[in-house]
Amino acid sequence: MSAGAGTASLVAPRPLLRPTPWQRLSNDARTLAFLFLLPTIVVLTSVVLYPFTYALVLSFQDKTAGLPARFIGLGNYVELLSDSEFIQIFYNTVWYTAVAVGIKFVIGLASALVLNQPRRFNNVYRTILFIPWAVPTVIASLVWLWVYNEFNGMLNLLLVRLGVLDTGIAWLAEPAWAMWAVIAVVVWHGTPFYTMHFLAGLQSIPAELYEAAEIDGAAARHKFWYITVPSMNSVFTITVMLSTVFTSTSIVTVNILTNGAPANLTQILPNESFNVAITAGRMGLGSAINMTLFPFLVVLIVILTRRLLRKDAG
């Protein structure tokens, strides 16, 4: 036997090192992904899923504050759908949301197109335009409550001094004007949200597209319809979707300005739900009122999301 062979036979084989728990975890992509997503899952479950599930279950119960709940199935929904007052409030909510979102869209787009043009003091104009959105909704509603005051409100004083009116108008009490007065406040407060999104979208459109269109002799309206609008479709979709949800589910403005008066002509579903659940104490019926709007919002979100995804895929 040679010396080399003898030496090799005396060397013991090295034991295989077992991977540490962290090494095993880092090689398991599925478990690692779950651990990274776990904080988000916990937050969404506790803040979104649990309250929504509880509200949904509550809508099937006859629940009064301080008393045990009693399951009644679709009893709350049958009561609502057989109530002509609720049907009117549902119609108010759809009308209020559609008109407010439409006006905010038009004014927001027009403002963004103006602010997108280079001019002196443009930053000052943008800052002033964005001030309404920075004002808390409660403060904005209280300010407009004074503006609409029948006796010493700024709007009536201005119109009387200009000779437009002989006497002041109770804007929030007149059936013909109340809803429009509420919508005006919502538009004033929410339009900067549209302007900000649309302005960011306009600034992301390559200038070369407009330059090429000018070389081809395209007019301003042609550049708007064939360059600006197609390039802004994604921004339009996301902004309208978010604004529709925010507008239709907010109770602050209506609650402070009119609380549904006169004769429920300005009442909307979120505010009615608050009044029924908190003021009247019928928590089950109040929860059912909110749930009646939920399917329509889901359908709207699904339609807009599919449209957005279809465009991105194309």
Image (cartoon, rainbow, N blue to C red):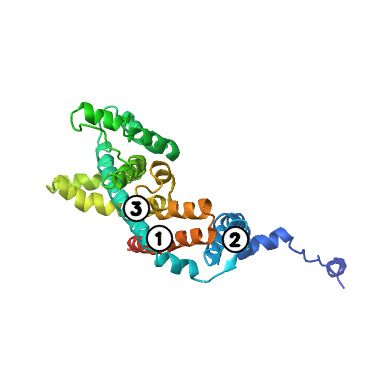
Seen in the picture, residue 189 relative to 98 is either above or below; the reply is above
Question: Residue type at mark 2?
Answer: Ala
On the image, numbered disc 1 is attached to which residue?
297
On the image, numbered disc 3 is attached to which residue?
240
Horizontal and vertical percent position of residue 238: 37, 53
Question: In terms of depth relative to the viewer, which is nearer, 133 or 161?
Answer: 161
For residue 134, what is the image quadrant? top left
Residue shown at 51% from the left, 50% from the top: 279
Quarter placement of the N terminus: bottom right
Identify the element where label 2 is drawn. Answer: helix
Horizontal and vertical percent position of residue 269: 41, 55
Question: In terms of depth relative to the viewer, which is nearer, 56 or 83?
Answer: 83
Horizontal and vertical percent position of residue 8: 83, 67
Identify the element where label 1 is drawn. Answer: helix
For residue 128, what is the image quadrant? top left
> Left or right: where does residue 133 sit relative to residue 42?
left
Quarter placement of the C terminus: bottom left
Mark nearest the camera among 2 and 3 is 3
Label 2 or label 3, whichever comes before in sequence order: 2
Label 3 or label 1, whichever comes before in sequence order: 3
On the image, numbered disc 2 is attached to which residue?
33
> Left or right: where does residue 22 sit relative to residue 260?
right
Q: Residue furthest left?
A: 217
